[in-house]
Amino acid sequence: MLALIGGSGFTNDDVIENRREIVMETPWGQPSAPLIEGTLKGTPILFLRRHGVKHEFAPHCVPSRANLWALKERGVSGVIAVGTVGGIASDMGPGRIAMPDQLIDYTWGREVSYYEDFGKFGMKHVDMTWPFDRALSRALLDAADRLNKDVRREGVYACTQGPRLETAAEVRRMQRDGADMIGMTLYPECALAREIDLPYAGICVSVNHAAGMGECADEIDFASLESSLQKAVSGVVDIVAEAIKELK
C-alpha cells in the first residue's frame, strides 16, 4: 500500500473513501493528524494531512519526523507527497501540475534528520543526488500520460521557510539559482524518507506565479488562490489514483 501526504487543497473529507482513522505515537511524538486508511477511487491507500485536521501546523512547524516514521511503521511501500507551489518558470502559472526532480533547501532551524543524537542513533549519511525517488516519480508520469494530463516532467523545487511568502528579490535570487517553483514542505520530508529507506515522490500544483513574476508582478492576490488550487488538485487526485492502481 502507498501513502499519500496531502497539504493545502486536501481539506475535504470526500477525497478518501471507506475511511478508518489510526492514531499513532512515534519516538518523535504524534503525527500531524491521525492516519486515514481507506480507498482512493477504489484502491487502498494511507492518507495523512500534513498540516493537521484543522490546518493547525504552519509549514515550518509540521512534525515531519513523526509523519514519515508513522507511515513507515504502518508498512507503506512508498509515499506520494502533494505540494502547492508558486511558479518561477514561465510555464508554471496557476493550475500547472509538475513533477520536481531536484530540490534546493532555503529553510533553517527545522528538524531535518533522525540522526541528531549520534550517541543514541549512530550516524547515517544518505545520498541526495536525486532527492525524489525516480521509479515512483516515473510511475506518476506514466499515469499522467495514460490520462492525457499535461504535466511538467521535471523541475527544481525551492523549499523556503514560510509561513510568509517570498519577496520579489528573493524570487529573483532563486531564479538565478535555477529554481522553477517555490514551496514550503517537501523538505525535510524527502530527506527523512531517504533516511528510513522509504521511496518518496513529490507532485506539485502551482496556485500562483511567485512574487514579482507574471500576474504577481505587483502583489499576490490571495483571493484567487483557492479557485486555482481546487481545480488543480482534482487533476492531481486523478493522477495519483491512476498510479496507485498500477502500483498496488
Image: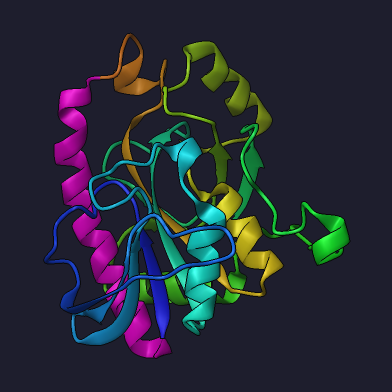
Residue 159 drawn in magenta: no
Please state the horizontal and vertical placement of residue 59, each as a whole percent of the image. Answer: 44, 39
Q: Report the magenta stretch's main SS.
A: helix
Identity of the residue drawn at 42% across and 15% down: 212
Residue 222 drawn in magenta: yes
Asked whether, in this view, residue 119 is left or right of residue 166, the answer is right
Identity of the residue drawn at 74% across and 58% down: 128
- Say above or below: 3 vs 172: below
Q: What sort of colour scheme is used for the picture?
A: rainbow
Please state the horizontal and vertical placement of residue 80, each as a whole percent of the image. Answer: 44, 67
Task: Give the magenta-colored segment's residue range.
Answer: 221-248
Identity of the residue drawn at 59% across and 64% down: 27
- Location of residue 145 by image quarter: bottom left
Most distant residue in the top direction: 218
Please state the horizontal and vertical placement of residue 113, each as a whole percent of the image. Answer: 70, 54
Please state the horizontal and vertical placement of residue 48, each as a whole percent of the image. Answer: 35, 64
> Does residue 11 appear in this view?
yes
> Does residue 183 appear in this view?
no
Identity of the residue drawn at 85% across and 57% down: 118
> Which corner quadrant holds the N terminus?
bottom left
- Say above or below: 115 vs 86: below
Q: Nearer the viewer, residue 83 or 68?
A: 68
- Location of residue 65 by image quarter: bottom right
